[in-house]
Amino acid sequence: MAEAKPKILIIEDDLDVAEMLNAYFRVQGYEVFTVNWGEDGVRSAQTVHPDLVILDIRLPDIDGYEVARRLRSDRRTADIPIIFLTEKRERADRLQGLELGADDYITKPFDVQELRLRVRNALKRMSQGSLTNPVSGLPEGALVDERLNDAMKINASGLLLVSLENMDAFREAYGFVASDDVLRAVSVMITNTLRELSNPDDFLGHLSPTEFVLVVPQPNLSPLQERLRTRLEQSLDYFYPIKDREQAAKRKDRLAVKIAEIDLTSVQFASLDQLKTEFLRQKR
């Protein structure tokens, strides 16, 4: 019996773009459905039950944000991965989409190969139950939440949040594949540094695609932070092509690292959300 093809629903009012994506993803082995209006997109998602939705923000009736809001509020469609397809590049626009539960976004004009990789990764995350990051292979989602909850109960650990800043700007300049290479390389550097201060209970995972969280014995917290900061900051310039490195060093949106530290032996949190909020506060 032939394996069922993954189903993609494309909600796009530009007929040329919709037709191109339809033809492209069919050739890639997907079952594709296309609609041109937001209301039709909501209805189609409820009847077709796609494995993934590619959603334009600018639509003739309701916008993509409203479509995403309705999909996330309906139990039949709440878990379908959504990739926003948009001409909007402002950070606030992207954040609005992510806050509504979108899994990814790509800005026009886009590289269809890049979109294909994003679709593949989103479907892979769903098939794995969001337990490992498809780029780094490190734990994410429920596995990370479980480990952080355990650390909060024991109150004997230290936590580090290593955040890669300005990855959006890097991705827009050099593409999806190059940004994945950065994440993989950084994950390897963090893993190797962690091994130097190895402890059986050490843990490394993703708090978000560009944020790594480490759980280590409290005495190792400061030495680990110092080593990580030094190694990562020395390495970031090398991710840029040689011809761009001098200019990249002067840019405000160049790749950077922020590290936040929490000592659970001296600070207690009532919930995991409170802990994550503290990480976000330290990053600012």
Image: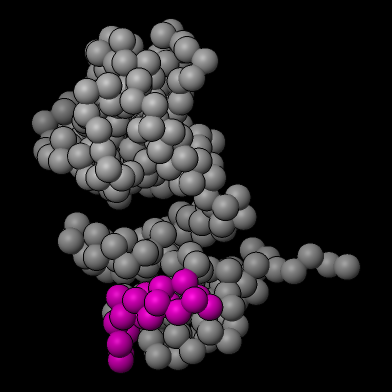
* Picture layout, residue 218 above or below residue 73: above
Instruction: Please tell me in which quadrant of the rendered image residue 71 appears.
Output: bottom left
Q: Position of residue 282 (x, y in %)?
A: 16, 35
Magenta stretch: includes residue 61: yes
Q: Nearer the viewer, residue 99 or 235?
A: 99
Q: Nearer the viewer, residue 240 or 231?
A: 231
Instruction: Tell me what residue is drawn at x 37 percent, y 44 percent.
Output: 208
Region in magenta = 59-78
What residue appears at the point 31 percent right and 80 percent down from the top-left corner? 66
Q: Quadrant of the N terminus?
A: bottom right
In the image, residue 143 above or below residue 122: above
Where in the figure is residue 92, as x and y percent of width and height?
18, 61
Q: Which quarter of the figure has residue 91? A: bottom left
Residue at image point 17% right, 37% down = 283
Q: Which quadrant holds residue 109?
A: bottom left
Task: Tell me where residue 57 appears, x and y as whole percent.
Answer: 31, 75
- Residue 182: horizontal and vertical position, in percent? 39, 33
As drawn, 200 above or below 166:
above
Can residue 4 be seen here? Answer: yes
